[in-house]
Image: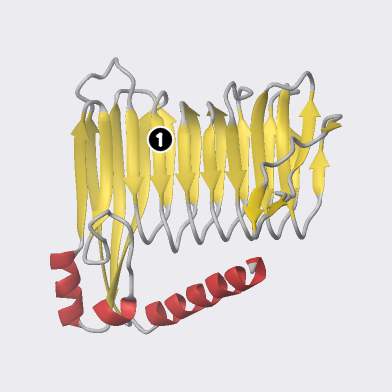
């Protein structure tokens, strides 16, 4: 079932790319904005929900968000470009020290999830974000196609989601989740995380760099790859799974994770891929 799911995802990407290649009209513009927080000295957060395009975020001095975005419309005709200008909007808001940047359009469901089909709309709108934010900021970043997510010099909690692209993070202090489907996940910590983390992909390697030997318990899983560690590890027995009752019988299912302890153990760091290597590395 897992192989079928992966093949279906790859076919879906190929169909989507074929739809995009058929859009031979193009128009682009650059958007620049400076966004302030209501309470600059209090904890801050940034939310970006993109569809097509990369997200590059860098921490810096100051208490404002400096946004530079390239908007590119690809369509079948000039009329479709004009339609895209009317229908697709970049919404930017700030409330309670949280800045939200949201790409909205007819491809959104009422619950803000996606239902995209270039064949029906006849256009595609891509936003490529280059953003500087205060160094101490919690982040939630999400994109789907045509772009990687790159983050650097940040302190705070992170939730990072991609589908068809890589996730690269450097000079990071904090903890959180970084998940994609088609692409590598590479994270370089400035300080060892103090809370649980999760790193996941389907097609790609996962490599995490620590500035010094962590005390953590790693849950690692790969189907078509190898597991490497720059530190000595101790293999731990996995906790028994809870049984399911099927046709009057108790069924125990393995999650196929291996448990590795580095140092004295402690926080849990989960690393999972289907086609790729897992590397616990030293910075």
Secondary structure found at label 1: strand
Residue corresponding to mark 1: 139
- Quarter of the picture containing the C terminus is top right
- Identify which residue is drawn at 47% across, 49% down: 161
Q: How many marks?
A: 1
Q: How is the image coloured?
A: secondary structure
Compared to residue 65, the image places residue 274 above or below, namely: below
- Quarter of the picture containing the N terminus is bottom right
In the image: residue 280, left or right of residue 102 = right
- Identify which residue is drawn at 55% across, 74% down: 8
What residue occupies the far top of the structure in this picture? 41
Compared to residue 80, the image places residue 276 above or below, namely: above
Front position in the image: 182 or 171: 182
Figure quadrant of residue 28? bottom left
Rendering coords of residue 198 (x, y %): 59, 39
Front position in the image: 194 or 266: 266
Can residue 283 be seen by looking at this rendering?
no
Front position in the image: 184 or 195: 195
Label 1: few (<14), some or many (≥20) within 10 Å? many
Rendering coords of residue 176 (x, y %): 52, 33
- Identify which residue is drawn at 26% across, 61% down: 108
Can residue 142 be seen by looking at this rendering?
yes
Rendering coords of residue 165 (x, y %): 52, 58
Rendering coords of residue 70 (x, y %): 31, 56
- Identify which residue is drawn at 60% across, 68% down: 6
In the image: residue 79, left or right of residue 280 = left
């Amino acid at each position: 079932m897992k192989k079928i799911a992966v093949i279906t995802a790859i076919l879906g990407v190929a169909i989507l790319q074929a739809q995009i290649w058929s859009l031979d009209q193009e128009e682009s513009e650059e958007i620049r904005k400076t966004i302030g927080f209501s309470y600059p000295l209090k904890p801050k957060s940034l939310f970006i929900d993109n569809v097509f395009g990369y997200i590059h975020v860098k921490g810096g001095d100051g208490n404002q968000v400096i946004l530079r975005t390239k908007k590119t419309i690809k369509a079948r005709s000039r009329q479709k470009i004009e339609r895209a200008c009317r229908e697709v909007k970049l919404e930017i808001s700030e409330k309670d020290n949280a800045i939200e940047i949201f790409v909205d359009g007819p491809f959104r469901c009422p619950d803000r999830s996606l239902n995209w089909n270039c064949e029906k709309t006849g256009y595609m709108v891509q936003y490529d974000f280059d953003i500087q934010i205060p160094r101490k900021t919690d982040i939630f970043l999400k994109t789907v196609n045509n772009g990687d997510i790159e983050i650097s010099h940040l302190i705070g909690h992170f939730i990072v989601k991609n589908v068809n692209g890589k996730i690269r993070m450097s000079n990071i202090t904090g903890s959180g989740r970084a998940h994609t489907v088609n692409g590598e996940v590479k994270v370089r910590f400035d300080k060892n995380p103090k809370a649980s983390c999760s790193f996941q992909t389907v097609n790609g390697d996962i490599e995490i760099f620590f500035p010094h030997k962590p005390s953590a318990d790693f849950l690692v899983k790969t189907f078509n790859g190898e597991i490497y560690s720059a530190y000595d590890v101790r293999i731990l027995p996995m906790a028994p799974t809870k049984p399911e009752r099927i046709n009057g019988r108790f069924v125990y299912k393995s999650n196929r994770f291996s448990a590795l302890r580095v140092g004295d153990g402690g926080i849990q760091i989960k690393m999972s891929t289907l086609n790729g290597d897992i590397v616990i590395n030293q910075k």
